[in-house]
Amino acid sequence: MAGGLEDVDEIPTQSEESKSEDKTSSQKSQDSYQSDGYRVSSDSEWPPPPPTKDHKMVHQLDDVTRDSEIKATEMFDQLEAINNTAMSIEEDVNKAIEGLDRNVELFALLVKKFPHVEKFKEAHEENKEIKKHLESIQMNAQAVEDEVMMTMDMMQYQDIHRQKIERVINVMRALSKYMNSLFEGRVEDSKRVSSAVHIQGDDTTQDVVTNEDIEALIDSLGKK
């Protein structure tokens, strides 16, 4: 025990290869966390969920940004298809209206030329009524195009939300790297002495320490 603090300065600096091994060992340690027996509960604040694939925050946020980007692209494609369909309907209606205009003019001349023929009058009125319906369809198609464009504009907010999430991810990653660097040690975790289960003054672990634990602690101290 004596001279322990003096020996700290004599600990050699880890090589790059050793640091790489430590990172690999740390990664394996994190991945080896077991979630057996853990159950998600909205009423439980502690313990936090284990750092498994389903609970790693950055992983989840990366999934959100990736999936939302994919779905947003699919929605834009669908909206574009709807807009193209509405434009096609509008073009077809315009052609139909042009033909009806000629029919209306023709039957107007026939009614004027043969005012006693009722069929000409009926055909004239029918064509005028059909034109009104087609104009209504034309207006609805234009309204669909306008709504699609407005929806596309609103969908632009999805990209803003993605950028905000990516900013959060970058901040979290920066904090993670900083904390890892801050708590980095020069002694490998596998070479450290295990923590005491009970320390004098503890209230909740008085009956936890066994004779075997005490003997093991004495042995570990004797090896120093």
Image (cartoon, rainbow, N blue to C red):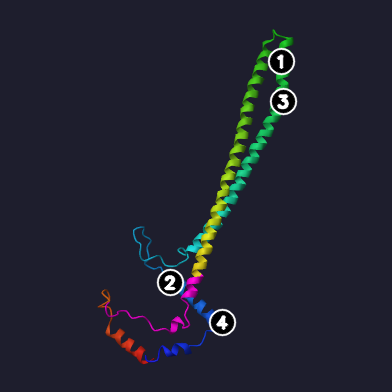
Element type where label 1 sits in the image: helix
User: Which tag, 1 or 4, sits closer to the chain's start?
Assistant: 4
Q: CA distance from mark 1 to mark 4?
A: 95 Å
Q: Is residue 1 above or below residue 137?
A: below
User: Which residue in the protein does label 3 denote?
Assistant: 99
> Left or right: where does residue 53 sit relative to residue 163?
left
CA distance separating discs 1 and 3: 14 Å
Which label's residue is closer to the chain start, 4 or 3?
Answer: 4
Q: Which residues are magenta?
A: 177-201
In the rendering, at what x and y percent does residue 129 appear? 63, 21
Using the rendered view, name the quadrant where residue 91 is placed.
top right
Crowding near pointer 1: few (<14 within 10 Å), some, many (20+)? some
Query: Which of label 4 and label 2 is nearer to you?
Result: 4
Secondary structure mainly formed by the magenta segment: loop
State the mark number for residue 108: 1
Q: Is residue 194 left or right of residue 161?
A: left
Q: Amino acid at mark 2?
A: Tyr
Specify the amino acid type for callout 4: Glu
Vertical relation: 203 (above or below) 85: below
Q: Which residue is mark 4?
A: 16
Q: Quadrant of residue 125?
A: top right
* On screen, residue 80 above or below 44: above
The verdict on residue 148 being magenta is no
Q: Which percent across, then down, holds residue 148?
A: 60, 41
Name the residue rendered at 64%, 27% in the picture.
135
